[in-house]
Amino acid sequence: MTRRMVGPTLARGSARLVLPLVCLALPLSAQSSGAGRGFLFGAPVGSVTIRGGYALANAGSDFFDFTTNELTLDRRDFSSPSLDLEVGARFLPRTDFVIWLSYSGMQKRSEYRDFIDNNDLPIEQRTQFRRVPFTVGVRQYLSAPGHSVGTLAWIPARAAPYVSVGGGTIWYRFKQYGDFIDAPSMNVFTSTYETNSWSWAAHGAFGLDFSLGPRFALNAETRYLLSRGSLSGDFSGWDPLDLSGLSTMVGLTVRF
């Protein structure tokens, strides 16, 4: 090998060594700048969130007034635990299209407040109230949920607050079964009363994603559901049933 050939040979050998090191160093640098949170190869395109919490029911319509006056039920008795499933698809850096499905339901024993039967026993019944809203909407992050480093790495933000709005439909059921009083005769009889149907629904929410890593985040959300539904069949003649309420939920988000 001559002196003239040494320079080009070393240069070619150095390039072969440096190029892989540069490719390796970029994601490692991204991970370091993320304070240990890791990175994804590219920004996530969607997410799935499962939450559990408690759904308060406003129970503000006249039928709830009648029920709580006659029976040993309070408005808070119509509130219940709730389970949420939300799927999001990102179409802008801070904006997701979201589909939301939730379930909440209660069942509680009650009796007439002011009446007993001929054997001095309470006149008892059970009440069920179910709500299953299904909406589509938009989730808008108030700050960047993450940032890209070069073309290879995406690092999630430690905390990302957001607001959400949406609209859709809700299935609901109100059911009472047991012993009741016939008002004209004051006779006690056994029966079942039920109404179930679909109605419109809308919601607004405020939430926070707290990253546990590149793919997982804790999620906390407060959501207000707005809806009213007609009382039909056994409960006809009343004003629309108040289906609105505030829910507070916590859960886990998986990015993909």
Image: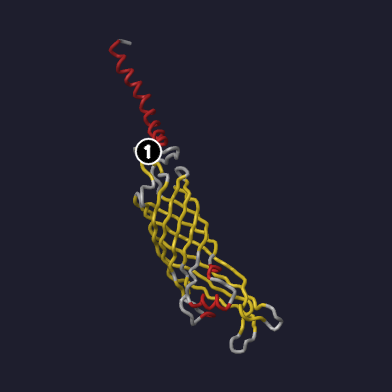
- Residue 14: x and y, percent? 35, 21
Residue at far bottom of view: 185
From the image, which quarter does the N terminus lie in? Answer: top left
Q: Specify few, some or many for label 1: CA neighbours under 10 Å numbering under 14, 14-19, or 20 or more.
A: some
Vertical order, 127 against 80 (above or below): below
Residue nearest the observer in this picture, 113 or 91: 113
Instruction: Say which quarter of the image contains residue 211.
Output: top left
- Residue 256: x and y, percent? 44, 47
Describe the colour scheme in one phrase: secondary structure
Residue drawn at the location 47% of the way across and 51% of the way down: 219
Residue at far left of view: 4
Residue drawn at the location 46% of the way across and 79% of the way down: 239
Residue at far front of view: 114
Residue drawn at the location 48% of the way across and 77% of the way down: 62
Q: Amino acid at mark 1?
A: Leu
- Residue 172: x and y, percent? 50, 70
Give the residue pinned by disc 1: 152
Instruction: Say which quarter of the image contains residue 224.
Output: bottom left
Is disc 1 placed on a helix, strand or loop? Answer: loop
Instruction: Say which quarter of the image contains residue 98.
Output: bottom left
Residue at far right of view: 119
- Residue 34: x and y, percent? 41, 38
Vertical order, 157 against 178 (above or below): above
Give the side of residue 100 with respect to residue 122, left or right. Answer: left
Residue nearest the observer in this picture, 63 or 18: 63
Residue nearest the observer in this picture, 174 or 27: 174
Give the side of residue 13 with respect to residue 237, left or right. Answer: left
